[in-house]
Image (cartoon, rainbow, N blue to C red):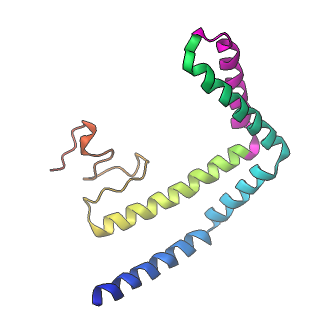
Amino acid sequence: MLATVERIELLEKAEELVQMVLDSDIAENYRQCLYRVKSSKDTQAKVKAFVKMKERYEEVQRFGRYHPDYKEVMGQIRVLKREVDLDDAVAEFKKAENDLQGLLDEISVLIGRAVSESVKVPTGNPFFDTGSSCGGGCGSGGSCGCS
């Protein structure tokens, strides 16, 4: 029974943490940037054109440079990707997304390290993959040091 009460308390604290993240300026900025991306007709037109060309790109990739449209599609996909990447709304969204991911990574590391220094926390960020943690896992072929 004690383990059940402890588990419920932990889940309640986790829900409080989730609410704190949702209420943060970082999460609010993320939501605003996402809204701008979704509501901008210009941005959506660029994304739609890129997605359509990406479908052609995947088709061409099956045959490689032997496909008759290879050069045309390869050139167009680069141009369209660049247009999407340079779109102000998309650039702001990507920054906001990275900021939110950074916050979540920091929280994961804090929780993992509070349990044990050897707990592996998958952050996807090499900045956090330090210490005795095995960034990438022991099977990655590196000189890990875990036993």
Q: Residue furthest left?
A: 147
How many numbered badges does the structure rendering display?
0
Q: Is residue 67 left or right of residue 144?
A: right
Q: Is residue 101 shown in magenta?
A: no
Give how far across and how far down residue 147 sits, in percent. Answer: 15, 50
Q: Nearer the viewer, residue 74 or 135?
A: 74
Q: Residue furthest bottom?
A: 1
Quadrant in which residue 20 is drawn: bottom right
Q: Is residue 36 left or right of residue 97?
A: right
Q: Is residue 78 shown in magenta?
A: yes
Give how far across and how far down residue 91 sits, in percent. Answer: 69, 43
Eyeballing the image, is 118 above or below 59? below
- Our reading of the magenta stretch's main secondary structure is helix
Quadrant in which residue 112 is drawn: bottom left
Name the residue located 60 percent from the left edge and 26 percent from the top edge. 58
Eyeballing the image, is 108 above or below 14? above
Give how far across and how far down residue 24 sits, in percent. Answer: 61, 69
Q: Which residues are magenta?
A: 66-89
Q: Nearer the viewer, residue 137 or 95?
A: 137
Give how far across and how far down residue 129 sits, in percent. Answer: 35, 49
Q: Is residue 114 left or right of residue 89?
A: left
Q: Nearer the viewer, residue 78 or 125?
A: 78
Quadrant housing the N terminus: bottom left
Quadrant in which residue 65 is drawn: top right
Name the residue located 24 percent from the left edge and 53 percent from the top edge. 132
Name the residue located 57 percent from the left edge and 55 percent from the top edge. 99
Eyeballing the image, is 122 above or below 61? below
Name the residue located 51 percent from the left edge and 55 percent from the top edge. 102
